[in-house]
Image (cartoon, rainbow, N blue to C red):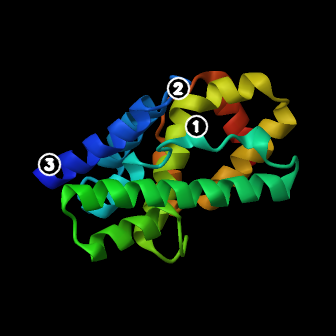
Amino acid sequence: MTSTLQTAIQGIDQANDADPTNSTEALYSQRMLETLQAFEPQASEPLTLACYAQHVCRWKLVRKDYPAGLDGYLNWRTDLAKLHAKILGEAMQEAGYANGDIKRAQHIIQKRKLKTDAESQALEDVSCLVFLNYYFDAFASKHSEERVIDIVQKTWGKMSHKGHQAALALTLPVHLQNLVGKALA
């Protein structure tokens, strides 16, 4: 890991350290980084930083502050992506990255050109893998089977073939494997 990359990661960590809610964004960043390293060992530094900053300062924009329904959700997600890109850009600039690398990382973290940009797609795959591996069980326990199956189908639709293969290789508890099986049937 280059010193520039380490410095940018520290900047992202410092931004998350300001969280008054003591959320788990630092843990999420670590899980994203570890999953990326297994999924895409030769990942570029802009992709690595976009993955690491995927939820940076997410606590600053709260879902309940947006209208209920799909439009409110989509507006919240768009605003979050812009916030993440801004904070990521600041951390990268402070670490000494060139403007081209900063813009590239901001493009990736906003998942622009998903399905046609390999690095944006890799970020999506990694975030889906992290969800399935670490957060799926808690999500499934709070929602109806129908809702969980719908979410798995939507998640699957966002992933690449490589992401599908990695997801199928995860060691999930039997009840979650069954839900994935139902979603993919």
Residue 17 relative to residue 70: left or right:
left
Residue 168 visible (yes or no): no
Please tell me whether mark 1 sits on a helix, a strand or a loop.
helix
Q: Residue at x 27, y 62 (%)?
A: 93
Residue 15 appears in the rendering = yes
- Assign a secondary structure to mark 2: loop
Residue under numbered circle 1: 59
Work out whether residue 175 or residue 12 is closer to the camera in this orientation and state it.
12
Identify which residue, 27 or 41, lies in the foreground: 27
Is the residue under label 2 in contact with that under label 1 (CB below 8 Å)? yes
> Distance from label 1 to label 3 (Cα)?
28 Å
- Contact flag, marks 1 and 3 (Cβ < 8 Å): no
Pinpoint residue 24: horizontal percent, then vertical percent: 49, 27
Q: CA distance from mark 1 to mark 2?
A: 8 Å
**Which of the 4 quarters of the picture holds residue 34?**
top left
Nearest the eye: 155 or 44: 44
Q: Residue, x 22% and y 72% (percent of image)?
A: 98
Residue 39 x/y as whole percent: 36, 50
Q: Would you say 21 lies left or right of 87 here?
A: right
Earlier along the polypeptide chain: callout 1 or callout 3?
Answer: 3
Disc nearer the start of the sequence (3/2): 3
Quickly name the residue at label 3: 1
**Residue marked by disc 2:** 20
Q: Residues within 10 Å of mark 1 (few under 14, many from 20)?
A: some
For the residues marked 3 and 2, what is the alpha-carbon distance in whole angstroms?
30 Å
